[in-house]
Image (spheres, grey):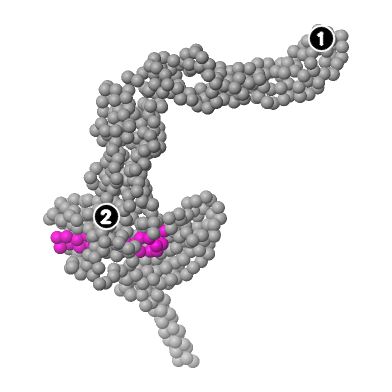
């Protein structure tokens, strides 16, 4: 390819030998090939020599042959007699190809080719006004090398499933973005690279996905005994469940939040991230509440699940044998989302405990996974996983309830606050007590810090921040509203005085952050207790002492006079 600078140099050297007169017989516009097609280099040159002096106009057009490369097939081995001819081309007006140097055929888009077993070569050509480019690829087809059985995941019912026969044998040993889907039941999107070939018996030349990956209503299972190579992280979808409060089991047991993460249930579709493969089953945990003529405190969300009961049927005595690692818990959950919390139970006694987990006040939001009989040996610790499942139609609000851990004459309870946020809320809200601890007296001040983080696009957003107090009985006290502007984060120190008429007990401070009708929030528990000496008490005591001293000093002065 001739460079424009070299052309100028050649012209100058040519003229220096007195031969410039010859240039008068050539066109004054010169055409050369260069690297950037379509560019034009123009200008004037003065040709000086012994015979002539001449001012010559010259334009150098930078042009190219067509840019051409073959994307597929590769120079590898294919396990199916169908291959796709795919390519990238630029600056071309006409393309054609042939197989094994046979007849030429025009091509204008990727083409499906059916070829016999054995070696093949594809020649691909592209032409424009400047010339013809040619690329070729050699490959082979060996349908006896490997058979992948995946009929259940083909065709329209297979949705977005990977078509394994499109890949070469080499690609199948390092395949990313593998998808298996049955549009009637669900989908698995594998997050990690998989060696599809390397199943439990990679010498038989068969990978049977039909037999070892099963999908049904509410069920997705991978047989890891036959497909250990598929034991990787994945996102799993269950379609059209029609459940109120779905709960998730893995290999017949409750799926822990360390394995089943980021659960969401929207529009009848349950999705989650599984850090390992296995058999996953979804069951309905909703239990219609039994009317007893009364109403539970704290609000629920309309439903049941996990077992509820009347607290009066237990004596409530703590005999020091059962230890629960939480006394109070606050959780924010969006509409259509499922969050899991782990609670540790420990038997610190010298006898076996049989513990039952029950709930009150959060019917329809809690999934306790049938923890009816947890056996704890002396000194043993076990985990209980609580799923908080919020339907799409649950109202945005703060709901209060209790978890009870009881059996063998022992009793523990955990206060639970569930803040239901809007489905598409933009913020993460954290509320923490920063001064004075979690126990305050009536008339004292509760000092908190509210941390609001923008989870969306960083830009200024106007919000309304509202503060509320709620007692265990569900009574709500509005504190105040304030306007704010959030770009990426807003941290607010807040001080609230606890009303003097507040009775002793547990209360929740919760914060609403509202932006364009979407609400997110957070909450924190605290306890009101009049048993201790409050800051207000010290204030009045010091004031009284000062008044007494003032009058006493005044009296002494009068006596001195």
Front-most of 521 and 421?
421
Q: What residue is pinned by disc 2?
A: 285
Residue 417 lies, in percent from the top left, at 34, 62
Magenta segment, prevailing SS (helix, strand or loop)? strand
Please say whether residue 401 is one of the residues in the magenta stretch: yes
Relative horizontal placement of residue 279, taking residue 237 as reference (left or right): left
At horizontal 29% and vertical 33% (from top left) the residue drawn is 210
Residue 466 on image: x %, y %: 46, 66
Q: Secondary structure at mark 1?
A: helix
Q: Quadrant of residue 186?
A: top left
Which residue is rendered at x = 25% and y = 53% of the image? 369
In depth, the one of 70 and 320 nearer the eye is 70
Magenta residues, start to end: 394-421
Q: Quadrant of residue 217?
A: top left
Identified at 44% across, 89% down, the residue is 555
Residue assigned mark 1? 22
Observer-nearest of 124 and 418: 124
Q: Secondary structure at mark 2?
A: loop
Q: Which mark is first along the chain, 1 or 2?
A: 1
Q: Is residue 404 above or below residue 254?
A: below
């Amino acid at each position: 390819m001739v460079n424009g600078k070299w052309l100028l140099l050649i012209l100058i050297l040519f003229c220096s030998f007195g031969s410039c007169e010859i240039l008068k017989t050539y066109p004054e516009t010169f055409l050369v090939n260069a690297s950037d097609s379509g560019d034009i280099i123009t200008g004037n040159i003065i040709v000086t020599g012994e015979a002539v002096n001449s001012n010559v106009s010259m334009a150098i057009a930078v042009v190219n042959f067509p840019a051409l490369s073959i994307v597929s097939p590769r120079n590898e081995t294919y396990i199916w007699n169908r291959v796709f001819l795919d390519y990238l081309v630029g600056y071309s007006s006409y393309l054609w190809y042939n197989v094994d140097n046979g007849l030429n055929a025009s091509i204008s888009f990727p083409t499906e080719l059916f070829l016999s077993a054995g070696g093949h070569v594809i020649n691909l050509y592209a032409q424009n006004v400047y010339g013809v480019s040619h690329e070729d690829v050699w490959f082979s087809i060996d349908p006896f090398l490997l058979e992948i059985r995946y009929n259940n995941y083909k065709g329209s019912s297979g949705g977005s499933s990977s078509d394994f026969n499109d890949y070469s044998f080499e690609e199948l040993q390092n395949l990313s973005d593998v998808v298996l889907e049955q549009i009637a039941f669900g989908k698995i999107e594998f997050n990690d690279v998989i060696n599809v070939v390397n199943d439990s018996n990679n010498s038989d030349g068969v990978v049977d996905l039909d037999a070892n990956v099963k999908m049904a209503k509410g069920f997705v299972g991978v047989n890891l005994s036959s497909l250990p190579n598929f034991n990787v992280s994945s996102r799993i979808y269950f379609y059209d469940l029609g459940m109120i409060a779905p709960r998730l089991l893995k290999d017949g047991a409750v799926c822990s939040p360390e394995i089943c993460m980021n659960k969401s249930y929207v529009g009848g579709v349950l999705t989650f991230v599984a850090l390992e493969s296995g058999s996953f089953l979804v069951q309905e945990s909703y239990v219609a509440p039994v009317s007893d003529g009364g109403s539970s405190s704290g609000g629920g969300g309309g439903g049941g699940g996990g077992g509820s009961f009347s607290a009066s049927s237990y004596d409530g005595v703590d005999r020091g044998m059962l230890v629960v690692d939480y006394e109070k818990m606050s959780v924010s959950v969006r509409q259509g989302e499922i969050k899991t919390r782990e609670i540790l139970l420990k038997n610190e006694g010298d006898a076996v405990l049989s513990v039952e987990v029950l709930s009150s006040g959060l019917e329809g939001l809690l999934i306790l996974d049938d923890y009816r009989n947890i056996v704890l040996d002396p000194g043993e610790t076990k985990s209980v996983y609580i799923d908080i499942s919020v339907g799409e139609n649950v109202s945005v609000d703060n709901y209060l309830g209790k978890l009870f851990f009881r059996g063998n004459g022992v009793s523990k309870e955990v206060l639970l606050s569930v803040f239901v946020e809007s489905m598409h809320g933009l913020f993460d809200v954290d509320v923490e007590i920063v001064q004075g601890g979690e126990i305050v007296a009536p008339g004292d001040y509760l000092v908190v810090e509210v941390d609001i983080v923008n989870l969306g696009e960083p830009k200024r957003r106007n919000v309304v921040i509202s503060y509320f107090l709620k007692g265990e009985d569900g009574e709500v006290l509005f504190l105040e509203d304030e306007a704010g502007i959030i770009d990426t984060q807003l941290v607010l120190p807040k001080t609230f005085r606890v009303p003097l008429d507040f009775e002793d007990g547990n209360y929740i401070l919760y914060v609403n952050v509202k932006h364009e009708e979407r609400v997110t929030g957070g909450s924190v528990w605290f306890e009101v207790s009049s048993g201790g000496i409050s800051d207000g008490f010290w204030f009045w005591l010091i004031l009284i002492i000062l008044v007494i001293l003032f009058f006493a000093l005044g009296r002494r002065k009068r006596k001195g006079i």
